[in-house]
Amino acid sequence: MNMNDSLPAAYFGKKGALFALALKTSLLTIVTLGIYRFWAKTRIRKYVWSSITVGEDALEYTGTGLEKFLGFLVAVVILAIYLGFVQLGLFFLGLHFIAEPQNQREALQQIAVFYISLFAVAPLIVFARYRARRYILARTRFRGIRFGMDKAAWGYVWRAIVHSLVTLLTLGLLLPRQTFNLEKYLTDHSHFGDQSFVQGGKWTALYPAVKHILFGAGLVLLSVVVSIAANALAGPGDRFSAGVIAAIVAAIGGYCWIIFGYVYYSVHSFRYLTAHKLLAGTVGFVALPRTGKVIGIYVTGLLIISVVAGFIFGVIGGVTAVFPMSISVSTAGYIVIAVLYLGALAMLGALSLVFITQPMIAHFVDTLAVRNPAGLDSVRQRAYDKGADAGGFADALDVGAAI
């Protein structure tokens, strides 16, 4: 790629600055009994967005904590009404929650209530993801020009449901088709200023990226076949024959390969889909994240957080152990212990942002470039979007990561 015809992206966020911000906002969230989390998320987004540059221009996040809080309240009311109607429907059908089923009929009723409730909420989770993305784009600016997204959440919901069912019925063989078509829907409904994004390419081109998932699934299937054969041939006392051991090894290896394959698929499908996006018909993109780097960031971050967590909870355990029994079981003792644990969780959340989320963002951003940036000069401002519920459904349903 000729760098004279492209603008490289870069991430300049610092570990110390993000840790201090994340820890402070987490503690404020605890003190305010969770209310401050909307402002906390907004402040973290503002920091991350301002640390991303394309060429010499940084992104800007213009969302506010107040609009997120108000959107959350509206979403909670709507969800309460919706779930109330769902429960009324279940009650009309003679189904209700049973704390401790006493017979098989009550156990089946419990299972039915659980899955009906789950399927009733699932479309809302997809709906919330779309609306959250729309809000984020509506509050993101580059060179002073707003991004945006069409009001097309329900179209995305039914497509996601249908594609997921097709993928499930084909045992995952049509996963590339699901990935491509859903991303195309999201991309084709996204805008920068008065210009639209378009997702090009074809879904069959994603099959090379899914090869490791299929290989891992093949190992798991092989382990099942070997296990059945080993049990059929084994004698009365051969519980751990060579065949059974081989089946266990193949199963473990298969599951581990599937996890690796999912990361590989996510990275390489992202590379392909990004390379086939266009803005205003002329502006292209290229992204070259690496699977090994992504896994390395995640594993390193988990190790660091695990070591720190072990130390922190060890100290908290030691502190509570030296308290006299009469104090540790008193109301004041419970409050002290609860505060210590909440503070520890706040610190671990901040560490997760610093050692996993931020490095992951940095890697993807640093490998990204905009091709033919001259095409951006023709982009004009778009109308202001109120952002609907400001991601309130995503907050109410706890959908999405920290930012």
Image (tube, rainbow, N blue to C red):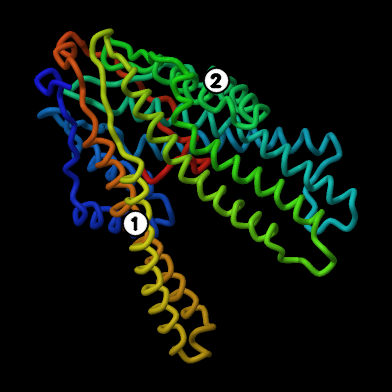
Q: What element carries label 2?
A: helix
| 217 left or right, relative to 382 | right
Q: Give the camera-side residue of 78 and 233.
A: 233
Distance Cα–Cα, label 1 vs label 2: 37 Å
> What amino acid type is highlighted by mark number 2?
Trp
Residue highlighted by disc 1: 301
**What label sits on residue 260 in the rendered view?**
none
Q: Is residue 318 above or below residue 399?
A: below
Where does the N terminus fall, quadrant-wise? top left
> What amino acid type is highlighted by mark number 1?
Gly
Q: From the top left corner, tell me how far across and down residue 227 is, in percent.
A: 72, 53
Q: In this view, does 17 lie above or below 112?
A: below
* Residue at the image position 76 percent from the left and 36 percent from the top: 88
Q: Quadrant of residue 174?
A: top right
Q: What element carries label 1?
A: helix
Residue highlighted by disc 2: 154
User: Sequence-wise, which precedes: disc 1 or disc 2?
Assistant: 2
* Residue at the image position 37 percent from the left and 23 percent from the top: 273
Q: From the top left corner, tell me how far across and down residue 16 is, in percent.
A: 19, 57
Where does the C terminus fall, quadrant-wise? top left
